[in-house]
Amino acid sequence: MVGIASSPDWIGTGIIERCCSWGDSEQSCIKQGSQTRVTLTTDPSVSDVFAAIQPLFNDQTQSVNLDRIDQTTWVMDHSWDELGAFDIYFSYQLDERLYQDQIAPKRVVVFPEQQNQWRIYTLIPRVSGNMGQWKADLQRIQDLGFNAVHILPINSRDKSLSPYASVDAYAIDMEWLDPASSAKSEDQWQAFVDELTRRNMHLGVDLVVNHVGLNHSFAKQHRSWLTSDSHEEDGLKRAGWRSADAWHSWRDLLLLNYDVQPPSEQELLWQAMTDYASYWAAFAAQTNGFVRLDNLHSSHPGFMRHLMAYLRNKYPNLVIFGELFGEEQHIRRLTGEYGLQLLLATMWEHKFTPELRRYLQYLHAQSGQLNYFCPVGSHDSHSIPEEFGSIKSTFPRLAVSALLGSGPWGMDQGVEYAVHEKIPFIGPLFEHRFTEMDGKIADWIRILNRISEDEPVLHEAGNITFVDQDHGAVLAAVRASQANNQALLCLINLDIQQPQEIEIKLNDDSSSQKWLDLLTGSTDHLPERHQLNPGQVKIFRLV
């Protein structure tokens, strides 16, 4: 009979040390298909060591016997072929008894191999016409070099006309219907998804689970599902966010109450919101795409664990992307609890070169544990001219996201049209759609997407070295791969008013190396000093 010992007295008499080829933190993010090795050091009297690989959201545990290398060393080689989140537990046999290792389990989040190759375009429905026009516009979006489309919610909207204030979980807003089509709304939407699939593009959809619109059916039929607030005229609490000293309300949104009682009502609410999330996630899953969890930092933890378990089991190839802000430890904890494969980086919040450099270093340093999507902006942020002072900032800022970020990059609709003001995503359908892209900006987007697609070193994270000596206006960084000796050198002048000069020192062999200028096509030795015009970008590949 094999027993399980849980006494802390056994710490150190069995497994003494644990070392993982992908890092020794309690939580790691690993690319699908990666081969990893765990090395354990044990007491010499240990006769066998076992690993249990437990999926976070189901009980299909895989048991593995470790190989003994010498009297005290054991190894486990493993290929991570399935997406999702997993815990690794270790146990060991000593004197014909089995003991559970006292070290905390190692949590591993596996993301798809193509995820860091995504180039994501956010489509804003109210400036894009109807679903027939969205479908036709995919040709233009793909020609710009994007291979994934994130679309804001398309549910029927409340009186505020915000896509995040729905009145129905499933119905599509009438403004998005193609008047020239006799097809049902759901069939028009499916045709759009099918066109994405045909083009081998990925779809991202928002899941809004924290709140509903003021006139949602819940307010009429299931009032107990909404959070009460005696200070509101209608007695219902508004959703919002909490700063350090206050609660800030969105006046058009009602906060859901996932702790509603009795338990039978709670079960009904949880099932209703699970069904809603599953319905929209199914469309993203058809394209091997992603769901974006809106305002995740404000979500109910118990319900989110329930929902993640459901989605992960029903759609195993679906990527879970969280809009998650807060303290680093909080982000790490929720990333592990929910099995998040992608998080949102806020590149636009870092206006000046020194702080942007530090932020990029931080993102890459986190890459073994947290994966970040690095867009130039968000539909919640302002336009590039509003954020950085001039439309001229478009060129260097796009380059920062595409070339120096730690994960997939992207942008919101409007950048290619040189919009000077943020496109408001709340409101009625615009009467006039965008027609002519800015030629120079569109060409620059195509160039960056081509380089992003062609250069494998940009699909890796944690491989950035800044070589700019903390220059006050210029970012200069090498993206390198030790595996195949590939390297890119990127020089980006964020000063859009003045030319800048920078000295680059790489290594002792740099004087003999030749570099291909990816923008001019010329090949030469790399000079130590570079002159950069205002907003200029230079990109070199090691030959």
Image: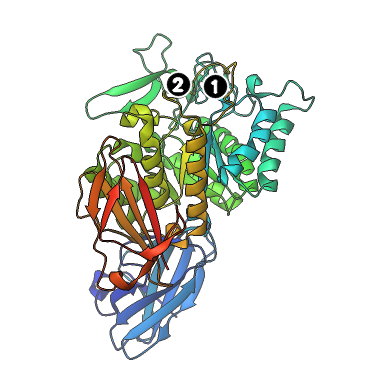
Q: In the depicted view, which residue is nearer to us: 264 or 391?
A: 391
Q: Residues within 10 Å of mark 1 (few under 14, many from 20)?
A: some
Which residue is labeled 1 in the image? 218
Name which quarter of the figure residue 101 lies in. Answer: bottom left
Q: Secondary structure at mark 1?
A: helix
Q: Is residue 103 shown left or right of residue 81?
A: left
Q: Amino acid at mark 1?
A: Phe
Q: Is residue 349 shown left or right of residue 76?
A: left
Looking at the image, the residue that sits furthest to the bottom is: 71
Mark 1 vs mark 2: give the one in front: 2
Q: Say above or below: 426 vs 198.
A: above
Which residue is labeled 2 in the image? 254
Residue visible at 67% across and 34% down in the picture: 135
Q: Where residue 345 sits: x, y (%)? A: 37, 43
Residue visible at 50% across and 48% down in the picture: 447
Does residue 84 appear in this view?
A: no
